[in-house]
């Protein structure tokens, strides 16, 4: 669950209204034929209690809606107002969907909902409301008023609603002055509240103690008043990213009472230190894109259950992560340090760490024991640092027997590192300065499936005999953008995808792919090939070949694949 939440955060877009389609309109997908009954023109009435007038460009509220209607959908129209006399007839309504119309506050009279005593779901998002309705029915469970222009809500908009569970107010113009202190009084079941993308300058007090998810991202929040979160003991997810929080806007008690908190996002703020008082239930802490210069162990003592710590794009320098600073986090699974100023791998990392993400730092040395404390690492990313072959110790990876993915792209390596873990599945070495490949560094890598050597300085003569011999599981090999003049011989038999684009290849011999009978995709674009420089026999032994990309060569090259092989999306090219 935590990982899916994290990934969800890295994705952009509006917050979903969970269960809207299924819970609000359960009968729309049913195919049973109803008996003849009154139904507004052009609308659909699949059941006696359901009226669907979606997307009809309606400018006037439809008449002739049956009094038996419980589910009424008018979304995606051009309605500007709701007539009270029409709504008051529909006292049995349970769901009213007005999403994406042109309804203004003047077109929504205060008494509009007085007679809707059974209403449970109301959707008025993407309209033109400047203030919220002063009164919504006591029976309400879900209220979506997002993406309007609202500047104010009232005590009985959401107050005194004992069954209310979800309130969506994101993408409005609400300031703290527009939220009354008793906005949720008497509504003790609210679990989800979205106030993101508004104009709040501090975290609103008197929020429902029943909250489980609170969205406050993309506001102007610079502080959390003392005690503002003291009653939210059921809160599991708190989103405060993209605000203006500083260290002085938080104190040691801000999060200390959140005994159920699992996810906390404080990224894109102005913090210079890790907040104090973090609860031990916390599993994911996102502190990326702040101004943090140092991580103190004392600040993390309370968060012993932390699994994912994200500190990318801060100002951590050579002393930013002192040895043992993360030692309290014994269960830490993933540590993100992308885009800082670290000049070496932090020492004494938690022993159970599984993923260390350190690209775009200043790491220039990898010593024999720098990674000794994390024998369980499965993913190590040191891409785009300052590593040279002379300063990578031959025993640097010796203890990483569980390592499956190693990324050393974008460094200054001139040869393959020695002592690579034999369990590797993925090895990325693109954009280095590799000038030679020898068999010895690749010895024992019989589980390697992907190898990227793109954007180096390799020539065919620099690839030693037997280099590929032990790569028995290799399926993808990227040798693009090197200085190869022909296809390297004796490539691995298991190879399915071969990238040779951007080299100096001038001909392809009949024997070029004899060693790779499983090849499915071949990329030869942007080389020096002519129409007659590829031997027709080169592809005869490749029954699985689906793609041959030869675009961007000196002449248009047309490839005739074997007749038993279906032609792929590109065979040849302009």
Image (spheres, rainbow, N blue to C red):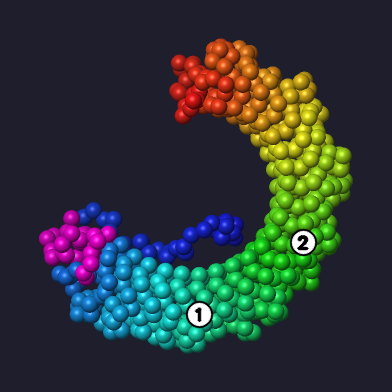
Residue 546, visible in the rendered structure? no
Q: Say which residue label 2 marks.
A: 316
Query: Residue 141 lies in what quarter of the image?
Result: bottom left
Q: Are marks 2 and 1 in contact (CB under 8 Å)?
A: no
For the residue pair 21 and 503, the one nearer the viewer reads as 503
Can the viewer see residue 548 in this picture? yes
Q: Which mark is residue 175?
A: 1
- Of marks 2 and 1, which one's residue comes earlier in the chain? 1
Q: Is residue 537 above or below residue 369?
A: above
Q: How many marks?
A: 2
Dot 2: within a 10 Å radius of its alpha carbon, few (fewer than 14), some, or many (20 or more) residues? many
Specify the farthest residue to the front.
554
Magenta residues: mostly which secondary structure?
loop
Q: Is residue 140 magenta?
A: no
Examine the structure image and report whether residue 44 is included in the region drawn in magenta: yes
Q: Residue at x 39, y 82 (%)?
A: 157
Look at the image and give the residue range highlighted in magenta: 33-61
Q: Depth check: give the residue in front, 459 or 383.
A: 459
């Amino acid at each position: 669950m935590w990982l899916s939440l994290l990934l969800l955060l890295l994705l952009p877009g509006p917050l979903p209204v969970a269960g809207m389609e299924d819970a609000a309109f359960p009968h729309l997908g049913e195919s049973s034929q109803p008996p003849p009954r009154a139904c507004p023109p052009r609308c659909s009435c699949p059941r006696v209690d359901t009226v669907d007038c979606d997307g009809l460009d309606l400018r006037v509220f439809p008449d002739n809606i049956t009094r038996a209607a419980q589910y009424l959908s008018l979304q995606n129209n051009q309605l500007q107002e709701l007539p009270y006399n029409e709504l008051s007839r529909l006292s049995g309504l349970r769901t009213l969907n007005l999403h994406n119309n042109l309804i203004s506050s003047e077109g929504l009279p205060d008494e509009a909902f007085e007679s809707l005593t059974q209403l449970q779901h109301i959707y008025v998002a993407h309209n033109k409301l400047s203030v919220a309705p002063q009164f919504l029915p006591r029976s309400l469970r879900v209220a979506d008023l997002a993406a309007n222009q609202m500047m104010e809500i009232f005590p009985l908009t959401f107050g005194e609603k004992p069954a209310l569970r979800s309130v969506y107010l994101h993408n409005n113009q609400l300031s703290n002055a527009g939220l009354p202190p008793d906005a949720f009084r008497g509504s003790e079941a609210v679990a989800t509240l979205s106030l993101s993308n508004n104009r709040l300058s501090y975290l609103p007090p008197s929020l429902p103690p029943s909250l489980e998810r609170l969205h406050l991202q993309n506001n102007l929040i610079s502080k959390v008043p003392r005690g503002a979160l003291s009653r939210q003991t059921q809160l599991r997810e708190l989103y405060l990213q993209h605000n203006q929080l500083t260290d002085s806007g938080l104190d040691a008690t801000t999060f200390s009472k959140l005994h159920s908190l699992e996810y906390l996002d404080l990224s894109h703020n102005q913090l210079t230190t890790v907040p104090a008082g973090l609860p031990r239930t916390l599993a994911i802490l996102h502190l990326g894109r702040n101004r943090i210069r140092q991580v103190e162990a004392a600040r993390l003592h309370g968060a012993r259950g932390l699994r994912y710590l994200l500190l990318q794009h801060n100002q951590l320098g050579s002393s930013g992560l002192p040895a043992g600073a993360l030692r309290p986090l014994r269960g830490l699974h993933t540590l993100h340090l992308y885009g800082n100023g670290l000049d070496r791998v932090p020492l004494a990392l938690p022993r159970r760490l599984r993923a260390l993400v350190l690209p775009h730092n200043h790491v220039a040395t990898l010593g024999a024991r720098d990674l000794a404390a994390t024998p369980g690492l499965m993913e190590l990313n040191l891409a785009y640092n300052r590593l040279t072959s002379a300063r990578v110790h031959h025993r640097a990876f010796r203890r990483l027997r569980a390592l499956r993915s190693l990324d050393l792209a974008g460094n200054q390596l001139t040869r393959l590192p020695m002592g690579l873990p034999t369990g590797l599945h993925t090895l990325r070495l693109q954009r280095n300065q590799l000038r030679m490949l020898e068999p010895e560094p690749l010895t024992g890598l019989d589980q390697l499936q992907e190898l990227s050597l793109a954007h180096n300085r390799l020539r065919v003569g620099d690839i030693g005999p037997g280099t590929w011999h032990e790569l028995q599981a290799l399926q993808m090999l990227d040798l693009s953008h090197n200085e190869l003049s022909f296809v390297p011989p004796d490539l691995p038999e298991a190879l399915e995808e071969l990238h040779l684009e951007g080299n100096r290849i001038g001909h392809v011999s009949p024997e070029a792919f004899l060693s790779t009978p499983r090849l499915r995709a071949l990329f030869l674009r942007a080389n020096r090939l002519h129409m007659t420089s590829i031997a027709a026999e080169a592809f005869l032994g490749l029954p699985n070949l689906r793609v041959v990309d030869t675009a961007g060569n000196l002449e248009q090259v047309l490839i005739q694949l074997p007749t038993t092989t279906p032609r792929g999306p590109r065979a040849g090219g302009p």
